[in-house]
Image (cartoon, rainbow, N blue to C red):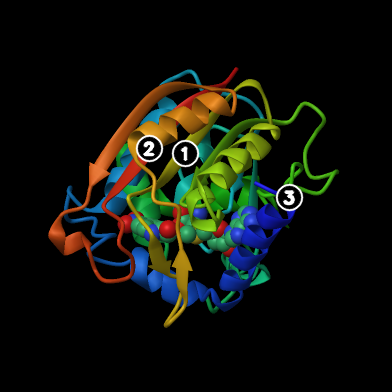
Amino acid sequence: MERKQKENGVAAMAVCYQGFDPAAYLQYNYTAPRADFGRNDSIVPWKLACLHRAFTEGDVSGELLVDIGSGPTLYQVLSGCEVFKKVLLTDFLEVNRQELRRWVQDEKGCNLDWTPYLQHVCKLEGRRPSAWTEKAAKLREVITDIVPIDVHRPHPLAPDALPSAGADCLVSCFCLESVSPDLAAFTRALGHIGGLLRPRGHLLLIGALGESYYFGGPGVKIPVVPLNEAQVCASLKESGFTLIRLEVYTLSQDMRVGVDDVTGVFFAKARKD
Ligand SMILES: C[S@@+](CC[C@H](N)C(=O)[O-])C[C@H]1O[C@@H](n2cnc3c(N)ncnc32)[C@H](O)[C@@H]1O
Ligand SMILES: O=[N+]([O-])c1ccc2c(c1)CN[C@@H](CO)C2
């Protein structure tokens, strides 16, 4: 594909994101039924269990964890914040970085109460749920910065954002397939974020399967690259990753709430070659 066509596809995605509404996005995806801690078949508890296991099974270690395309959410680093001394959050949009900063600085006006998430992950860690206040303090302590990112750039972060050795671990959830115009761009973006990771560092990747669009706010319909498992595995391999584990969650009818056409969610644990 011509360079101009690639640039046009990426530019069109950036335009789609100008209408992204963090409050609506949180409401659509991070409240019941998708985030129902009383149901073990709810999507968010499944994601938290995948992340907890991946961060605590002994092979993941180091100093710096980077979350790629954090959006307005924090769930993706609630286990990692106990393993890494430094956590860097990143997003393309200032509105999302502001939402995250409000929580980190314990300001009023957050659009979601993360307490049930903190309590749930404490339970996964064998701690009493009331330890959530300690986990919140820990997370606020290890988050070093909240910075801009563009995964379509060969160097997605500012030059001084990372130490020269790179990150020790990356986590990225529902970002690459939701910001790329096509599968080739998804795979290129995977290669770009791989460049942020030290050799043999780990990537924990969560994403949508079979999704062609989602609403990023009322009337804000954002196109998504519809992926299947084989494509995820092929893109990881092509981008210089060795797959360690792939887990898949298939949405039941009541998890399909009209905000997207996602059919499944994948969790991939991989290591950079
Ligand atoms: C579907 S949301 C995922 C948010 C969050 N990680 C989660 O798990 O729900 C996709 C995120 O990608 C961000 N984004 C959009 N374009 C991007 C780009 N070119 N590079 C990196 N992130 C981008 C959006 O601002 C949005 O926060
Ligand atoms: O069920 N979930 O936990 C959940 C969370 C976030 C997102 C989805 C599903 C599906 N759509 C993506 C955007 O492509 C965002």
Kindly identify the amino acid type of the residue bearing the numbered disc 3: Arg
As measured in the structure, the alpha-carbon distance from the residue carrying label 3 to the one carrying label 2 is 31 Å
Q: Earlier in the sequence, mark 1 or mark 2?
A: 1
Residue at the far front in the pictured view: 2
- Callout 1 crowding tier (Cα within 10 Å): few <14, some 14–19, many ≥20: many
The image's mark for residue 205 is 1
In the picture, the disc for residue 243 is: none
Q: Amino acid at mark 2?
A: Phe
The Cα atoms of the two marked residues, 1 and 2, are separated by: 6 Å
Residue drawn at (46%, 28%) of the image: 234
CA gap, disc 1 and disc 3: 27 Å
Residue highlighted by disc 3: 3
| Mark 3: secondary structure | helix
View quadrant of ligand 2: bottom left
Earlier in the chain: of badge 3 and badge 2, it is 3
Query: Is the distance from the Cβ of mark 3 to the nearest ligand 1 atom less than 8 Å?
Result: no
Q: State the residue lying farthest toward the right.
A: 160
In the rendered structure, which disc, 1 or 3, sits on the residue that comes first in sequence? Answer: 3
Rendered position, 54 above or below 28? above
**Secondary element at image label 2:** strand
Q: Nearer the viewer, residue 96 or 80?
A: 96
What element does badge 1 sit on?
strand
| Residue at 63% in and 25% down | 62
Q: Are marks 1 and 2 in contact (CB under 8 Å)?
A: yes
Q: Nearer the viewer, residue 140 or 4?
A: 4
Numbered disc in front, either 3 or 2 = 3
The residue at 50%/32% (across/down) is 235
Q: Where residue 267 is drawn, which disc sits there?
A: 2
